Image (spheres, rainbow, N blue to C red):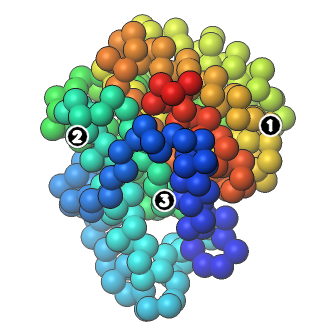
Amino acid sequence: MGAHHPECPERLGAVNDHLLAKGLLDYMDACDAPLATREQLARAHSGFYLDEFAEIAQQVPEGGLVQIDPDTSINAYSYQAALRSAGAVVLAMDMVLGGKSPAAFCNIRPPGHHAERSNAGGFCFFNNVAVGIRHAVAVHGLERVALIDFDVHHGNGSEDILFNDEHVLMCSIFEKNLYPFCGDVPMGSNMINVGLPARSGGEAFRQAVEQQWIPALNAYQPQLIVISAGFDGHREDDMGNLGLVESDYEWVTRQIMKVANQHAQGRVVSCLEGGYALSALGRSAAAHVRVLIGAD
Ligand SMILES: [Zn+2]
């Protein structure tokens, strides 16, 4: 994205360092992310957009940047990175749904939840979770997948792609009046959008999860839960102002795992979205993963 951009390569190292320091990597298998195929991407994105993005990517000079939107640019390697980011989620689906692993955490960038069917934006190019969900439905035959998004920003791209998808229930909690400035009115009946005012804090966040997500998730009985795990709602992160802390991420993960264990054979694929204060990101992701893999 260029120098001094918050969506920086060090983010992945911060997460990995904390997983290592907490001893969690001892319980996890590390996998390299394959490149997503055109067929996989086309389940979530229009052919026009895929062609357009590939063409722009080819024109980026070595060492240069091309601006995609005011916050988002690409360098000569971004296209390959975006393909691997989406490919990681596809691999995670195959591992979890193929019974090779009970749960997966995709430590990936670029993030994906602002990428719409035909638009990049908000540091996102391919909608990683939507590509993964469509793969789970098309290849593994799932009928009910729940997508949970607790990034401080609303997952407008996921909503754009998945609204009224008969195989998906999407639950999003986000800070109101913050980028991408939408989500207050859900686009489809399969969306549960909860906008919280700035400075709501952990208690209001937990109450929203308990009152608005959990009953809907239990009624839906998902066969798989996918998480858009953004940690930019942390109080040390300047990107948002919800005022969450590590224990809130740990708590929400525990609630999600309860639903997964009850309905989905514990199957969860969690994918990194936002989180830009490196220390808070690493600590929060480790708190999340510890519960996700049952090491708590
Ligand atoms: Zn975010």
Whole-number angstrom distance, CA of label 1 to CA of label 2: 35 Å
Whole-number angstrom distance, CA of label 1 to CA of label 3: 24 Å
Question: Judging from the image, what secondary structure is the residue with disc 3 in?
Answer: loop
**Residue to which mark 3 is pinned:** 109
The residue drawn where x is 64% and y is 23% is 251
Marked residue nearer the N-terminal end (1 or 3): 3
**Residue to which mark 2 is pinned:** 94
**Quick one: 91 or 24, which is closer to the camera?**
24
Q: Position of residue 262 (x, y in %)?
A: 39, 9
Q: Are marks 1 and 2 in contact (CB under 8 Å)?
A: no
- The 10 Å Cα crowd at callout 3, few under 14, some 14 to 19, many 20 or more, is many
Q: Position of residue 142 (x, y in %)?
A: 22, 26
Task: Determine whether 256 is above or below 103 in the image.
Answer: above
Q: Amino acid at mark 1?
A: Gly
Question: Judging from the image, what secondary structure is the residue with disc 2 in?
Answer: helix
Q: Amino acid at mark 2?
A: Asp
Q: Position of residue 233 (x, y in %)?
A: 71, 41
Task: Determine whether 30 is above or below 193 in the image.
Answer: below
Marked residue nearer the N-terminal end (1 or 2): 2
Q: Quadrant of the N terminus?
A: bottom right
The residue drawn where x is 76% and y is 50% is 237
Q: Quadrant of the C terminus?
A: top right
**Residue to which mark 1 is pinned:** 243
Relative placement, left or right, of 36 versus 293 is left
